Amino acid sequence: MGEEKDESKLTLPGLEIRLERRKIYNHSDETRLTTKEFDILCMVVANKGRVVTYEQIYQNVWNEFPTGRENGTVGFHVRVLWNPKERN
């Protein structure tokens, strides 16, 4: 994991997100995510300490106005992020 001086990143204890490279490091190990999972994780980490609703996630990640049916879609991706075994 080489350091780049000007690269933007988000961090939490044990987690580093390299925004330009779209890479995630969990305790220095690279973790692969889908595009949507990456975008959701970035949004949640960037808003740490604040409540982020499914509607906000949907609007920002899918770039669509929520219609009320997005909870299942967003919920699936959030469950996979928190429990990768859900992916299979």
Image (cartoon, grey):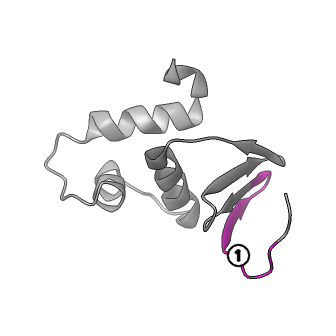
Q: Which residues are magenta?
A: 4-15
Name the residue nearer the viewer: 87 or 70: 87
Q: Quadrant of residue 63?
A: bottom left
> In this rendering, would 82 be left or right of 4?
left
The percent coordinates of residue 16 (x first, y second) are 73, 58
Residue of label 1: 7
The percent coordinates of residue 19 (x first, y second) are 61, 66
Q: Is residue 72 above or below residue 6?
A: above
Q: Is residue 72 above or below residue 12?
A: above
Identify the secondary structure beneath mark 1.
loop
Q: Name the amino acid, label 1.
A: Glu
Name the residue nearer the viewer: 69 or 50: 69
The percent coordinates of residue 64 (x first, y second) are 21, 58
Which residue is at 52% across, 57% downward? 44
Name the residue nearer the viewer: 72 or 35: 35
> In this rendering, would 33 be left or right of 8?
left
Q: Residues within 10 Å of mark 1 (few under 14, many from 20)?
A: few
